Image (spheres, rainbow, N blue to C red):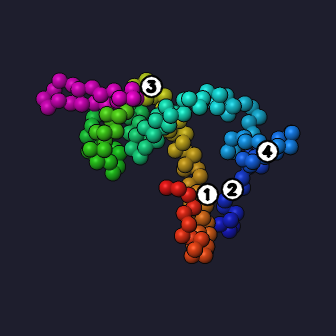
Amino acid sequence: MSPQDAIPAAPSDIRPANSIGNNGLATKPPRCSVADPDGRLAHLRSRISRDACPAIREVLNRVGDKWSSLIVVMLSEGRMRFSDLRRAVDGISQRMLTRNLRALERDGLVRRTVLPTVPPRVDYELTPLGQTLVEPILLLAAWASENRDAIAVARRQFDAEAAALPLSTAEIPLSKP
């Protein structure tokens, strides 16, 4: 099997961004509209208004950052002390864990409990709202795991094609940073 064969073909039900409407004039549909025979995607899209986009982006920035998803997954197993959580989230510094826990607490996803012991014990756990985030994060993680090989092949192919471009073309950025 060649690397080309490992890249899944684009679904045939994806329409290009520029198409011609029934009146012969170019229409401006969304960037990529996917066929939705059971209406599930349309239902989800209908819940997202353009006015809500900044708020959605803010929430996605919180739950999609480097550490928050891992913290939520670790806390899905139950209440944890700070030190246990730091050991469970490989590679996170004390400062980053503190910042992320505070942000998750501010967003109502994590509850911080200080127990009156000597020394004081601090526990963290997911709130009911935070618990609703566990399944989507695990589904996204499963998708990433299932598709990591195809993504790696696509990256290698992209890098090989970019390296084969003439020098003057290769110096032109392919996308804005």
Kindly report the distance in space between the C-alpha atoms of the residues bearing marks 3 and 2: 36 Å
Q: Which amino acid does label 3 sit on?
A: Leu
Mark 3 or 1 closer to N-term? 3
Query: How would you rate the neighbour count of disc 3 (Cα within 10 Å): few for under 14, some for 14-19, many for 20 or more?
Result: few
Query: How would you rate the neighbour count of disc 2 (Cα within 10 Å): few for under 14, some for 14-19, many for 20 or more?
Result: few
Kindly report the distance in space between the C-alpha atoms of the residues bearing marks 3 and 4: 44 Å
Residue 63 shown left or right of residue 7 in the figure: left
Residue 10 shown left or right of residue 77 in the figure: right
Camera-side residue: 167 or 62?
A: 167
- Whether pointer 2 and pointer 1 mark residues with C-beta atoms closer than 8 Å, the reply is yes
The N terminus is located in which quarter?
bottom right
Which residue is at a point 14% across and 32% down the rendered structure image? 119
Kindly report the distance in space between the C-alpha atoms of the residues bearing marks 2 and 1: 7 Å
The kind of secondary structure element at disc 2 is: loop
Badge nearest the viewer, 2 or 4: 4
- Whether pointer 3 and pointer 4 mark residues with C-beta atoms closer than 8 Å, the reply is no
Res 26 label: 4
- Whether pointer 3 and pointer 1 mark residues with C-beta atoms closer than 8 Å, the reply is no
The kind of secondary structure element at disc 1 is: helix
Mark 1 or 4 closer to N-term? 4
The kind of secondary structure element at disc 3 is: helix
Mark 3 or 2 closer to N-term? 2
Which quarter of the figure has residue 151? bottom right
Pointer 2: what residue? Answer: 8
Query: Where does the magenta region start and end?
Result: 105-125
Pointer 3: what residue? Answer: 129
Q: What residue type is labelled 1?
A: Ala
Pointer 1: what residue? Answer: 150
Q: Position of residue 134 (x, y in %)?
A: 48, 34
Q: State whether residue 73 appears in this view.
A: no
